[in-house]
Amino acid sequence: MIRIRATDEMAEAVHQEFENADVVIKAAAVSDYAPRASAAHKIKKGPNEWVLPLKRSEDILRALGRQKKHQVLVGFAAETRDLERNATQKLAEKNLDIIVGNLVGPSNSGFASDINTVTFFFRDGTKEVLPSMEKQAIAHILLDRIVEKAMMSATQ
């Protein structure tokens, strides 16, 4: 376990370990933007509104996809619409082997629930639609698909 507090720390840690990894599952949703500067002390309330300048965070998964050699790379796509289009676009753009997509919004599925409804999209263009089930069961199925992918890659 490597403890981090910010997106740039996560990027540094992931890049340091990536070459030695066989499988990378990027499930952490880091912020797309971060404050351009941090304050050493509390910023006191003033008479005017305050604008917080932001900088774009590194897209860690995209960077891993560019340097990928033998690794099986898995990402996630939580979408509010156009799940298949957005997930398959991310799959291709980030050079992933598998992307797990789900629609965000239903109260009985997703972030606020132990249940989720997902679709696995694979590099070869196939997909696997799973019924609603506990997230732990989804994780086990995902690990099975990763092992299958790794075994196929090893025999080629």
Image: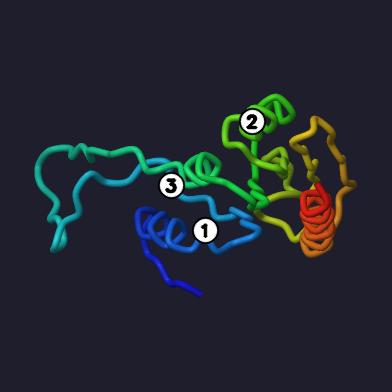
Tell me which corner region of the image, top left, top right, bottom left or bottom right, holds residue 21. bottom right
* Residue type, numbered disc 1: Glu
| Tag 3 and tag 1, C-beta contact below 8 Å | no
Observer-nearest residue: 33 or 155? 155
The residue at 38%/58% (across/down) is: 12
Around disc 3, counting alpha carbons within 10 Å, would you say few (fewer than 14), some (14 to 19), or many (20 or more)?
Answer: few
Q: CA distance from mark 3 to mark 1?
A: 24 Å
Label 3 residue SS: loop
Image spot of residue 122 (x, y percent): 77, 38
Q: Residue at x 51, y 39 (%)?
A: 66
Quadrant hosting residue 151: bottom right
Q: Bin the neighbour count of mark 2 within 10 Å (Cα to Cα): few under 14, some 14-19, many 20 and up.
A: some
Q: Is residue 116 left or right of residue 81?
A: right
In the image, 105 versus 98, the foreground residue is 98
* First-in-chain label (3 vs 1): 1
> In the displayed image of the protein, which residue is found farthest to the left?
47
Front label number (3 vs 2): 2
Residue 103 pos. (x, y %): 71, 38
* Disc 1 and disc 2 in contact, CB within 8 angstroms: no
Q: Residue 108: x, y in percent?
A: 77, 50
In the image: residue 76, left or right of residue 155: left
Residue for badge 3: 31
Q: Residues within 10 Å of mark 1 (few under 14, many from 20)?
A: some
The residue that mark 1 highlights is 19
- Against 6, residue 106 (above or below) is above
Q: Which mark is residue 92?
A: 2
Residue pictured at 61% horizontal, 37% vertical: 95
Q: CA distance from mark 3 to mark 2?
A: 21 Å
Q: Amino acid at mark 3?
A: Ser
Spatial separation of the CA atoms under disc 1 and disc 2: 21 Å
